[in-house]
Amino acid sequence: MAKRTTILKVSGLRRAFGPNTIFEKFSLEVRTGEAIALTGRNGAGKSTLLRCLVGADRPDDGRVQVCGNAMSEASPEIRRDVATVIDDLDFFPDLSVVEHLDLLARAHGIADPDDVVDEVLEEVQLVPQSGQLPGTLSSGQRRRLALATAFVRPRKLLILDEPEQRLDSEGLTWLTQRLKSERQKGLAIVFASHEPELVETVATRVIQLGAPRE
Amino acid sequence: MSRLEAGADDFAYHQTPEPQALIPASPRELKRLIKDWRAGRATRNVLQAMSDAYVAVFAAVMVGAMVVNVILNAQRTIAQCTSESCLSARTILPWAAFAATVAMALAASRLFGPVLASAAEGFWLLDAPISRAQLLRSRLVGGVVAAFLGGALVGGLVSALTGSGTTEVMVWAAATAFSAAASVAFAAAQQGVDRHVLTRAATYVFGLLGVGALFSVVGVAAGWFSLGLSDNLGIEIGVIMIAASALVLAASAVLAALRLGQIRRARLLSGGALVSGISGAFFALDIGLARDIVVERRAIERGHVHPKRGKGLGIEAIIWREWQRLWRFPQPLLVLAGTIVVPYACDALGMSTLTPVVAALALFGALIPLLGGLRVLTRTGGLARCLPFSLARIKLASIAVPAILAGIWAVATTPAYLGFGDGAVQRTVPDASFIAIATAAAGLLAAVRWTQAKGVDFGAPMVASQAGAFPPGLVTNLFRGFDVCLITTAPLLLGFSPFWSMLIAAIAAMILLNSMDAETLRARQAEQQKQLAAERKQRAEAAAAAKQRKR
């Protein structure tokens, strides 16, 4: 059995907004083939924690390391290794769905990206919309496109914030199976979710954030 | 007695009278009602509001006086010129302004409607059983009047700036005003039958006429041809334009009024939503956001494209995609090509000293639409985070195509700095080339600065002022881009060597294109401070432990 290497190491993370401490002394280690689910009520700090993990927000204290390198959003190595789907994903208004995916795949050095792009498009059921511009997509379709951006490129760590949002039941089933398969292939995953079925099927560990609602 | 045995009287009921047919309120009554509600909620009248904003009013008066002074000075200077190039420019430039104003009025009309309704009006009023035509009539009139006033301002201003006499200024102001109003009325008439082809075609025709007029100024200045225009020709053509525009205005206004009731609700509301989004962005003085809204709207109108396969790998893929995006929406190239005329026209007008500043400002405006990729990649971190490159490299890739175009622009405008018009400053080819390069760099970097400007942070500590608290970046955001243009071209304006301008441009480029690296430096600095604090803590703990052991 292959030795599991540490992909993400978080130690002593703290984030507070004024007097309101969101999380403190948060530590976590994620190795290849592990999927960590962050659960908890709204406002428990799941999204803030994920934003700190991907470098979109700066923690007040603590360290985040990806593959042994200190987390820096500007680092090309980190950008190469970490695929993220959080709320701040933007799209070119004049590039179609398939062109976005083609651009990402090529930028990551995939020489002949057609097969990968077609396969992912098929999976996220956006083949009929492949020529559409992002502004014309429904919110669910935009979510599928955002998820597709994480799967057309090489990755070692996948960070997702409530990936089930705006997906229909069929989409949720696909996502669950896809994440499970990604984990089994050795990908490290950290995701926040409110969907019990997704958490149960994909996660190898569940971390409850914040005090449960009384 | 059981219920079944009850007589008919027991079940008698009072028949309610037939309801009278309801008479819906008239659109005028509804509008008056809404106006009353709004006025009823106001806590201050106009005078009180103006007294609160007296700083802004005072500043507007001061700036207005300065602008009028500048116009009068420019008019006096240009009115004295006697060369053929200057005289022809003086005659033709109002035509160019006329054509450009008509093109802009048509383009704006097509973008916004021109007749539009807000979402609230769409929900509460357009669904009511009232005459839609009556409801929208004031919108049509408002649009036509606004275009008339705007046209008069532009036509009069350009005519005055080119040193024309009072009669000529008035004639061109009236001609441009009538034609702009006619354009809006024409677009409204087309909107009534849900057709935009004629409006679009007319936009291009007038746009090309404007550029053609500018080219003829250059041609005369270069001595390629002579127009031999008489002094009164401007007035004669202006009067003809007034008559023709008034006829088009009358016919289009009647047609538009007749078709007002046929305009689709969706079309009315989309214009309203666009105005609402843009006005929101303008209230926050976020012009970049206003442009994003327009760009998004155009893309939604197009909706679907024929996908093209990308080229290259790694960073090259981004450059190729920028190229493909440009060819998908190539209209900005026409504007860029049009700005090549600007330095030539400036020189022809005898404004050699001001040429680099005006040309850089024109290029700045023309390059903004070409930097859409940079805008998307820098406005949020999401998309850039998906790409395996530093932000500095991503920015360089995004501006590669516009930079090449700016380089071509510099080559094309070099002859303008050789001393083009009569009485212009004569320069050597290397000097002219360096000035053209410095001007192009100023325009490009200004556009880069404008494009990657972040919106104002309303969460930051506010600055107190007489007009109330405002976030620090609110006012400076307005000058983004213009500052780079002016600072970079300042040495040229003051007669220094173009190398100074190029040096300033190089420094500006380092700052603008490496801003993420500055971010990285800050992150590293914070990381080092954390390590330092941790080490100090460890040392203090060790010292305390040593003391404890000694005791």
Image: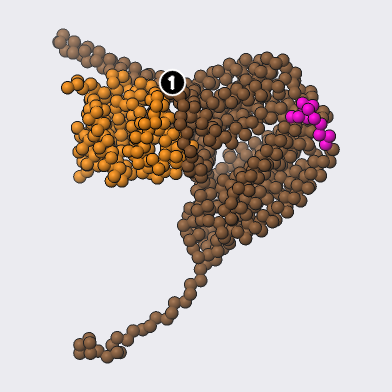
CA neighbours of label 1 inside 10 A, class few (<14), some (14 to 19), many (20+): some
Image position, residue B369 (x, y; %) = 55, 34
The colour assigned to chain A within the rendered structure: orange
Task: Give A138 or B428, whichever is nearer the viewer.
Answer: A138
B381 w.r.t. B24: above or below: above
User: What residue would you read off at disc 1?
Assistant: B517
Residue A19: % across, % down: 30, 34
- Name the amino acid, label 1: Asp
Q: Position of residue B56 (x, y in %)?
A: 58, 40
The colour applied to the residues of chain B in this rendering is: brown
| In the displayed structure image, the side of residue B384 where residue B408 appears, left or right | right
Between A117 and B295, the residue placed more toward the observer is: A117
**Depth order, front residue of A175/B119:** A175
Residue at screen point 45% across, 24% down: B312
Above or below — where is B26 with respect to A56?
below
Residue B59 position (above or below residue B133): above
The residue at the point 65 percent across, 51 percent down is B186
Which chain is home to disc 1? Answer: B
Is residue B330 at least partly visible in the picture? yes
Tell me, yes or no, whether the highlighted magenta stretch contains residue B447.
no
**Residue stretch in magenta:** B218-229
Quarter of the picture holding the N terminus of chain B = bottom left
Judge from the rendering whether residue A206 lies leftward or rightward of residue B71; answer left or right. left
